[in-house]
Image (cartoon, rainbow, N blue to C red):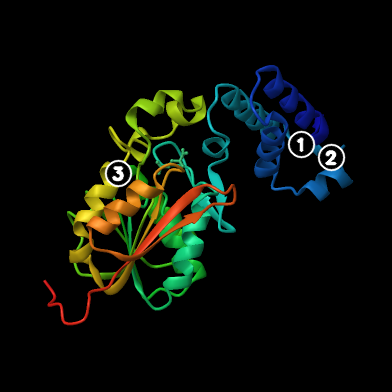
Amino acid sequence: MITIQEAFQTGRRELSDRNIENGELDAWLLLSSLLRISKAEYLMNPLKEMSLEDYEVYQEGIKKRCQHIPLQYITGEQEFMGLNFRVREGVLIPRQDTEILVMEALKLSEGKRVLDICTGSGCILLSLARLGSISYGTGVDISEAALEIARENAEQLQVTVDLVKSDIYSQVEGKYDIIISNPPYIQTEVIPTLMEEVKDHEPVIALDGKEDGLFFYKKICRGLKDYLNPGGHVLFEIGYDQGEAVKKLLQEAEMKNIHIIKDLAGLDRVVTGTWSQKKGEPFT
Ligand code: GLN
Protein backbone atom coordinates (compact mmCIF):
# COMPACT_ATOMS: atom_id res chain seq x y z
CA MET A 1 0.00 0.00 0.00
CA ILE A 2 1.14 3.50 -0.74
CA THR A 3 0.17 6.71 1.03
CA ILE A 4 -1.11 9.76 -0.81
CA GLN A 5 1.96 11.63 0.37
CA GLU A 6 4.31 9.02 -1.09
CA ALA A 7 2.40 9.10 -4.36
CA PHE A 8 2.57 12.89 -4.54
CA GLN A 9 6.30 12.95 -3.73
CA THR A 10 7.10 10.30 -6.33
CA GLY A 11 5.07 12.09 -9.00
CA ARG A 12 6.60 15.44 -8.16
CA ARG A 13 10.11 14.03 -8.40
CA GLU A 14 9.47 12.32 -11.71
CA LEU A 15 8.11 15.49 -13.27
CA SER A 16 10.92 17.68 -12.02
CA ASP A 17 13.55 15.13 -13.13
CA ARG A 18 12.04 15.43 -16.60
CA ASN A 19 12.09 19.23 -16.38
CA ILE A 20 8.34 19.59 -16.71
CA GLU A 21 7.41 23.18 -15.96
CA ASN A 22 5.28 23.50 -12.81
CA GLY A 23 5.92 19.82 -12.08
CA GLU A 24 5.02 20.09 -8.41
CA LEU A 25 1.71 21.77 -9.14
CA ASP A 26 0.85 19.29 -11.88
CA ALA A 27 1.70 16.32 -9.64
CA TRP A 28 -0.70 17.74 -7.09
CA LEU A 29 -3.45 18.55 -9.60
CA LEU A 30 -3.26 15.03 -11.03
CA LEU A 31 -3.61 13.53 -7.57
CA SER A 32 -6.40 15.81 -6.41
CA SER A 33 -8.33 15.40 -9.65
CA LEU A 34 -8.04 11.60 -9.42
CA LEU A 35 -8.93 11.25 -5.74
CA ARG A 36 -11.21 14.30 -5.59
CA ILE A 37 -9.46 15.58 -2.49
CA SER A 38 -8.75 19.16 -1.44
CA LYS A 39 -5.38 20.45 -0.25
CA ALA A 40 -6.81 20.70 3.27
CA GLU A 41 -7.88 17.04 3.23
CA TYR A 42 -4.44 16.05 2.02
CA LEU A 43 -2.65 18.09 4.67
CA MET A 44 -4.83 16.73 7.45
CA ASN A 45 -4.23 13.14 6.50
CA PRO A 46 -1.16 12.70 4.27
CA LEU A 47 -0.66 9.12 5.43
CA LYS A 48 -4.01 8.04 4.06
CA GLU A 49 -3.52 5.04 1.84
CA MET A 50 -4.62 4.89 -1.76
CA SER A 51 -5.69 1.82 -3.66
CA LEU A 52 -3.28 0.14 -6.00
CA GLU A 53 -5.70 0.80 -8.83
CA ASP A 54 -5.71 4.55 -8.18
CA TYR A 55 -1.95 4.56 -7.85
CA GLU A 56 -1.59 2.89 -11.22
CA VAL A 57 -3.87 5.47 -12.83
CA TYR A 58 -1.83 8.22 -11.15
CA GLN A 59 1.45 6.74 -12.39
CA GLU A 60 0.02 6.51 -15.87
CA GLY A 61 -0.92 10.20 -15.68
CA ILE A 62 2.56 11.17 -14.52
CA LYS A 63 4.04 9.19 -17.38
CA LYS A 64 1.85 11.03 -19.89
CA ARG A 65 2.73 14.38 -18.37
CA CYS A 66 6.43 13.46 -18.74
CA GLN A 67 5.70 13.17 -22.46
CA HIS A 68 4.45 16.77 -22.44
CA ILE A 69 0.80 15.83 -22.80
CA PRO A 70 -1.08 18.80 -21.30
CA LEU A 71 -2.34 18.15 -17.79
CA GLN A 72 -5.90 18.95 -18.82
CA TYR A 73 -5.97 16.20 -21.45
CA ILE A 74 -4.91 13.76 -18.76
CA THR A 75 -7.43 14.85 -16.13
CA GLY A 76 -10.04 15.51 -18.83
CA GLU A 77 -11.09 18.82 -17.34
CA GLN A 78 -10.34 22.53 -17.11
CA GLU A 79 -11.95 25.12 -14.90
CA PHE A 80 -13.12 28.25 -16.72
CA MET A 81 -15.21 31.08 -15.25
CA GLY A 82 -15.55 28.91 -12.15
CA LEU A 83 -17.22 26.17 -14.19
CA ASN A 84 -15.87 22.74 -14.96
CA PHE A 85 -15.35 22.01 -18.67
CA ARG A 86 -14.59 18.65 -20.15
CA VAL A 87 -11.66 18.58 -22.58
CA ARG A 88 -9.68 16.02 -24.55
CA GLU A 89 -7.36 15.95 -27.54
CA GLY A 90 -9.16 17.52 -30.47
CA VAL A 91 -10.30 20.62 -28.63
CA LEU A 92 -8.39 23.71 -27.46
CA ILE A 93 -8.03 23.87 -23.68
CA PRO A 94 -9.88 26.95 -22.33
CA ARG A 95 -7.41 29.70 -21.38
CA GLN A 96 -7.68 32.05 -18.44
CA ASP A 97 -7.13 35.00 -20.80
CA THR A 98 -10.42 34.19 -22.50
CA GLU A 99 -12.25 34.94 -19.26
CA ILE A 100 -11.65 38.65 -20.07
CA LEU A 101 -13.67 38.19 -23.26
CA VAL A 102 -16.48 36.48 -21.38
CA MET A 103 -16.51 39.18 -18.69
CA GLU A 104 -16.99 41.85 -21.36
CA ALA A 105 -19.74 39.88 -23.06
CA LEU A 106 -21.55 39.32 -19.77
CA LYS A 107 -22.01 43.09 -19.52
CA LEU A 108 -23.75 43.21 -22.90
CA SER A 109 -25.56 39.91 -23.27
CA GLU A 110 -28.60 40.10 -20.99
CA GLY A 111 -31.66 38.97 -22.92
CA LYS A 112 -29.65 38.83 -26.16
CA ARG A 113 -29.16 36.40 -29.00
CA VAL A 114 -25.53 35.29 -29.05
CA LEU A 115 -23.51 33.67 -31.84
CA ASP A 116 -20.16 32.17 -30.82
CA ILE A 117 -17.97 31.45 -33.84
CA CYS A 118 -15.21 28.82 -33.43
CA THR A 119 -16.81 27.66 -30.20
CA GLY A 120 -14.40 24.77 -29.50
CA SER A 121 -15.19 23.31 -26.08
CA GLY A 122 -18.06 25.80 -25.88
CA CYS A 123 -16.45 27.57 -22.95
CA ILE A 124 -17.42 31.09 -24.06
CA LEU A 125 -21.02 30.48 -25.07
CA LEU A 126 -21.79 28.04 -22.29
CA SER A 127 -20.36 30.39 -19.65
CA LEU A 128 -22.57 33.18 -20.98
CA ALA A 129 -25.60 30.90 -20.99
CA ARG A 130 -24.90 29.56 -17.54
CA LEU A 131 -23.69 32.70 -15.73
CA GLY A 132 -25.61 35.35 -17.66
CA SER A 133 -29.10 35.47 -19.06
CA ILE A 134 -28.94 35.26 -22.84
CA SER A 135 -32.18 34.66 -24.69
CA TYR A 136 -30.71 32.28 -27.26
CA GLY A 137 -27.28 30.99 -28.17
CA THR A 138 -25.65 29.31 -31.14
CA GLY A 139 -22.11 27.98 -31.17
CA VAL A 140 -20.51 27.03 -34.46
CA ASP A 141 -17.32 25.17 -35.23
CA ILE A 142 -15.90 23.38 -38.23
CA SER A 143 -14.61 20.54 -36.05
CA GLU A 144 -17.00 17.70 -35.32
CA ALA A 145 -14.73 16.55 -32.48
CA ALA A 146 -14.97 19.97 -30.83
CA LEU A 147 -18.75 20.08 -31.23
CA GLU A 148 -19.09 16.70 -29.59
CA ILE A 149 -17.22 17.97 -26.54
CA ALA A 150 -19.18 21.23 -26.55
CA ARG A 151 -22.40 19.19 -26.48
CA GLU A 152 -21.14 17.15 -23.55
CA ASN A 153 -20.29 20.39 -21.75
CA ALA A 154 -23.72 21.85 -22.46
CA GLU A 155 -25.30 18.78 -20.97
CA GLN A 156 -23.02 18.77 -17.94
CA LEU A 157 -23.72 22.46 -17.30
CA GLN A 158 -27.42 21.97 -18.01
CA VAL A 159 -27.74 24.75 -20.55
CA THR A 160 -29.59 24.69 -23.83
CA VAL A 161 -27.86 26.16 -26.86
CA ASP A 162 -27.59 25.16 -30.51
CA LEU A 163 -24.23 23.70 -31.52
CA VAL A 164 -23.84 23.54 -35.27
CA LYS A 165 -21.16 22.39 -37.65
CA SER A 166 -20.42 25.41 -39.79
CA ASP A 167 -17.47 26.97 -41.60
CA ILE A 168 -17.82 30.41 -39.97
CA TYR A 169 -21.24 31.60 -41.25
CA SER A 170 -21.88 28.84 -43.80
CA GLN A 171 -24.69 27.22 -41.80
CA VAL A 172 -25.74 30.24 -39.70
CA GLU A 173 -29.29 31.46 -40.09
CA GLY A 174 -30.94 34.58 -38.74
CA LYS A 175 -29.43 37.57 -36.99
CA TYR A 176 -27.81 38.01 -33.61
CA ASP A 177 -27.29 40.80 -31.09
CA ILE A 178 -23.83 39.59 -30.21
CA ILE A 179 -21.18 37.89 -32.29
CA ILE A 180 -18.31 36.65 -30.19
CA SER A 181 -15.22 34.71 -31.21
CA ASN A 182 -11.85 33.46 -30.11
CA PRO A 183 -10.74 32.28 -33.53
CA PRO A 184 -7.38 30.72 -34.39
CA TYR A 185 -5.05 33.74 -34.47
CA ILE A 186 -1.45 32.57 -34.35
CA GLN A 187 0.64 33.14 -37.46
CA THR A 188 1.55 29.86 -39.15
CA GLU A 189 5.28 30.58 -38.89
CA VAL A 190 5.02 31.13 -35.12
CA ILE A 191 3.40 27.76 -34.39
CA PRO A 192 6.69 25.75 -34.36
CA THR A 193 7.97 28.07 -31.60
CA LEU A 194 5.10 27.31 -29.20
CA MET A 195 5.47 25.04 -26.17
CA GLU A 196 5.58 21.33 -26.93
CA GLU A 197 2.33 20.89 -24.98
CA VAL A 198 0.55 23.27 -27.33
CA LYS A 199 2.15 22.65 -30.71
CA ASP A 200 2.28 18.85 -30.47
CA HIS A 201 -0.96 18.12 -28.63
CA GLU A 202 -3.54 20.86 -29.09
CA PRO A 203 -5.42 21.01 -32.40
CA VAL A 204 -3.50 23.15 -34.88
CA ILE A 205 -6.74 24.16 -36.59
CA ALA A 206 -7.74 25.90 -33.36
CA LEU A 207 -4.50 27.91 -33.33
CA ASP A 208 -3.45 28.62 -36.90
CA GLY A 209 -4.63 32.04 -38.09
CA LYS A 210 -2.75 31.52 -41.39
CA GLU A 211 -0.05 33.76 -42.84
CA ASP A 212 -0.75 36.99 -40.95
CA GLY A 213 -2.81 35.46 -38.12
CA LEU A 214 -5.79 37.56 -39.20
CA PHE A 215 -7.47 35.19 -41.63
CA PHE A 216 -10.50 34.38 -39.45
CA TYR A 217 -11.04 37.95 -38.23
CA LYS A 218 -11.25 39.03 -41.86
CA LYS A 219 -13.70 36.27 -42.68
CA ILE A 220 -15.89 37.04 -39.67
CA CYS A 221 -15.78 40.79 -40.33
CA ARG A 222 -17.07 40.26 -43.85
CA GLY A 223 -20.36 38.92 -42.45
CA LEU A 224 -20.92 41.25 -39.51
CA LYS A 225 -23.43 43.51 -41.25
CA ASP A 226 -25.43 40.51 -42.46
CA TYR A 227 -25.54 38.62 -39.18
CA LEU A 228 -25.70 41.40 -36.57
CA ASN A 229 -28.89 43.18 -35.64
CA PRO A 230 -28.60 46.98 -35.66
CA GLY A 231 -27.06 48.05 -32.37
CA GLY A 232 -25.47 44.63 -32.03
CA HIS A 233 -21.95 44.03 -30.78
CA VAL A 234 -18.92 42.07 -31.93
CA LEU A 235 -16.30 40.87 -29.45
CA PHE A 236 -13.03 39.22 -30.42
CA GLU A 237 -10.22 37.71 -28.43
CA ILE A 238 -6.94 38.73 -30.06
CA GLY A 239 -3.21 38.09 -29.76
CA TYR A 240 -1.30 40.70 -27.72
CA ASP A 241 0.05 42.40 -30.87
CA GLN A 242 -3.11 42.33 -33.00
CA GLY A 243 -5.10 45.18 -31.39
CA GLU A 244 -4.53 47.83 -34.03
CA ALA A 245 -4.86 45.44 -36.96
CA VAL A 246 -8.19 44.03 -35.75
CA LYS A 247 -9.44 47.52 -34.87
CA LYS A 248 -8.74 48.50 -38.48
CA LEU A 249 -10.66 45.47 -39.75
CA LEU A 250 -13.65 46.47 -37.64
CA GLN A 251 -13.44 50.03 -38.93
CA GLU A 252 -13.38 48.73 -42.50
CA ALA A 253 -16.45 46.64 -41.63
CA GLU A 254 -18.11 49.94 -40.57
CA MET A 255 -18.35 49.01 -36.91
CA LYS A 256 -18.44 51.95 -34.49
CA ASN A 257 -17.40 52.50 -30.89
CA ILE A 258 -14.36 50.25 -31.15
CA HIS A 259 -12.46 49.45 -27.97
CA ILE A 260 -9.30 47.50 -27.25
CA ILE A 261 -9.34 45.90 -23.80
CA LYS A 262 -6.30 44.62 -21.92
CA ASP A 263 -5.88 41.37 -20.00
CA LEU A 264 -4.59 41.00 -16.45
CA ALA A 265 -1.01 41.06 -17.72
CA GLY A 266 -1.66 44.48 -19.28
CA LEU A 267 -1.62 43.13 -22.85
CA ASP A 268 -4.21 43.83 -25.53
CA ARG A 269 -6.57 40.86 -25.44
CA VAL A 270 -10.06 41.82 -26.58
CA VAL A 271 -11.46 44.12 -29.28
CA THR A 272 -15.12 45.12 -29.33
CA GLY A 273 -17.27 47.11 -31.73
CA THR A 274 -20.90 48.01 -32.36
CA TRP A 275 -22.95 47.88 -35.52
CA SER A 276 -24.77 51.19 -35.39
CA GLN A 277 -25.95 52.87 -38.50
CA LYS A 278 -26.12 56.60 -38.80
CA LYS A 279 -29.61 58.09 -38.70
CA GLY A 280 -31.36 58.19 -42.02
CA GLU A 281 -29.10 55.61 -43.59
CA PRO A 282 -31.15 52.89 -45.19
CA PHE A 283 -30.59 49.33 -44.10
CA THR A 284 -28.85 47.39 -46.78
N1 GLN B 1 -4.25 32.04 -26.69
C1 GLN B 1 -3.97 30.80 -27.32
C2 GLN B 1 -2.53 30.40 -27.12
O1 GLN B 1 -1.75 31.22 -26.74
C3 GLN B 1 -4.32 30.89 -28.80
C4 GLN B 1 -5.76 30.79 -28.99
C5 GLN B 1 -6.17 31.09 -30.39
O2 GLN B 1 -5.46 30.99 -31.39
N2 GLN B 1 -7.38 31.46 -30.44
O3 GLN B 1 -2.17 29.28 -27.30
Q: Is mark 3 on a helix, strand or loop?
A: loop
The residues tagged by marks 1 and 3 sit, at their Cα atoms, a distance apart of 39 Å
Closest to the observer: 257 or 10? 257
Q: Which of marks 2 and 3 is in front?
A: 3
- On the question of residue 120 being in view, the answer is no
The residues tagged by marks 2 and 3 sit, at their Cα atoms, a distance apart of 43 Å
Q: How crowded is mark 2: few (under 14 residues within 10 Å), some or many (20 or more)?
A: some
What residue is at 82 percent from the left and 33 percent from the top? 5
What residue is at 23 percent from the left and 58 percent from the top? 253
Q: Residues within 10 Å of mark 3 (few under 14, many from 20)?
A: many
> CB at mark 1 closer than 8 A to ligand 1?
no
- Residue at the disc numbered 2: 48
Q: In this view, does 67 lie above or below 180?
A: above
Closest to the observer: 204 or 9? 204
Say if mark 2 contacts mark 1, CB within 8 Å: yes
What residue is at 84 percent from the left and 39 percent from the top? 48
What residue is at 82 percent from the left and 44 percent from the top? 42
Q: Which of marks 1 and 3 is nearer the N terminus?
A: 1
Quadrant the N terminus occupies: top right
Question: Residue 169, percent across and down?
Answer: 21, 55
Q: In this view, does 147 lie above or below 212?
A: below
Which numbered disc covers residue 181?
none
For residue 184, which quarter of the picture?
Answer: top left
- Residue at the disc numbered 1: 50
Q: Is mark 2 on a helix, strand or loop?
A: loop
Q: Nearer the viewer, mark 1 or mark 3?
A: 3
Q: Which of marks 2 and 3 is nearer the N terminus?
A: 2
- Residue at the disc numbered 3: 143
Quadrant the C terminus occupies: bottom left
